[in-house]
Image: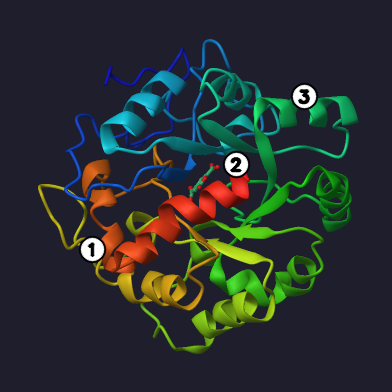
Amino acid sequence: MSKPTTGGFAKTPGWLDWYEGPSKPRLQLPPGSVDAHCHVFGPGDRFPYAPERKYTPCDASWQQLFQLRDHLGFERNVIVQATCHGADNSALLDALRRSEGRARGVVTVRRSVSDAELKSMHEAGVRGVRFNFVKRLVDFTPKDELMEIAARIAPLGWHVVIYFEAQDLPELWDFFTALPTTVVVDHMGRPDVRQPVDGPEFELFVKFMRDYPNVWSKVSCPERLSVSGPPALHGERNAYRDVVPFARRIVETFPDRVLWGTDWPHPNLKGHMPDDGLLVDFIPHVAPTAQLQRKLLVDNPNRLYWG
Ligand SMILES: O=C(O)c1cc(C(=O)O)oc(=O)c1
């Protein structure tokens, strides 16, 4: 892949660029596999970063994303609006339109969005909106505004993607369980993997999925959640062992409601930037059988985004 650029913006100090020259995964992805969580950033000189952003990344273009898709062996992408672009979805919509039907999108909108805009986003391949509750990434949006947006996108057949941290689930519970659509949780609701997999915090997340059959989870981002590593670098095939029991429990308990994504280009990682080929080779640790892998990578994302 070509080298990361910045389009004239100054990156957040300490920013880690995505890993150049990822390895080829040993795992042969089944035909029709979807990378169901990834982003495009800019390029900043064409699609400027939002004034209200909390970080400034390196650019990550649709060309670089689709090159990675082909290199890793995925057929399709779900591109999720990154908070550094706020509610300006232009870079994402441009990527969808250039994907030849091989990408779907999840956008961020305000209550001022018009019906015509929603329709045009749908035609471009958008199938969901993202509500973000991670305080380091976004300013607070009132819940009544979010509920209004959810009610407007529900008739389009779209779903709501939520990003939050495990300790905030109790406070957000009533809001989440009142959402009228399918609800997809980013990165398993960010469990603290130092706690037991059957401890009260993760049990609440499992209860959320068990009691509400409209709730799905991405079992993505071991590189973010891991505390003890080791990182997916230098040929390591047993990376992020502390995350495995959490992701595996979700995959085995709810095999028809899980998704997987690279999270490329991995915004805001601090310690290391993973080799995306090795990240793909993490999948069999959490989905150990061919059948579970097919549901996670092919059946579930295609049903939700291309069904
Ligand atoms: O944990 C993060 O920093 C992060 C940020 C974003 C975003 O800025 O949209 O998306 C993610 O999936 C994860």
Distance, label 3 to label 2, CA atoms, is 17 Å
Camera-side residue of 179 and 307? 307
- Residue 91 visible in the current orientation: yes
How many neighbours does mark 1 have within 10 angstroms: few (below 14), some (14-19), or many (20 or more)?
some
Amino acid type, residue under disc 1 in the picture: Gly
How many neighbours does mark 2 have within 10 angstroms: few (below 14), some (14-19), or many (20 or more)?
few
Residue placed at 30% from the left, 37% from the top?
73
Amino acid type, residue under disc 2 in the picture: Trp
- Residue 55 place in picture, x, y as percent: 51, 36
Count of marks, rendered view? 3
Which residue is denoted by mark 3 in the rendering? 120
Q: Is residue 112 above or below residue 8?
A: below
* Dot placed on the residue nearer the N-terminal end, 3 or 1: 3
* Among the 4 quarters of the image, the one containing residue 4: top left
* Dot placed on the residue nearer the N-terminal end, 1 or 2: 1
* Among the 4 quarters of the image, the one containing residue 97: top right
Residue 306, which numbered label? Answer: 2
Distance, label 3 to label 1, CA atoms, is 43 Å
Residue placed at 23% from the left, 47% from the top?
28
Amino acid type, residue under disc 3 in the picture: Ser
Q: Quadrant of the N terminus?
A: top left
Residue 229, which numbered label? Answer: 1
* Dot placed on the residue nearer the N-terminal end, 3 or 2: 3
Q: How is this picture coloured?
A: rainbow
Residue placed at 73% from the left, 46% from the top?
158
- Residue 239 place in picture, x, y as percent: 21, 60
Camera-side residue of 179 and 16? 179
**Between marks 1 and 2 in the image, the one whose residue lies nearer the viewer:** 2
Residue 292, which numbered label? Answer: none
Label 3 SS? helix
Label 1 SS? loop
Residue lying furthest left: 235
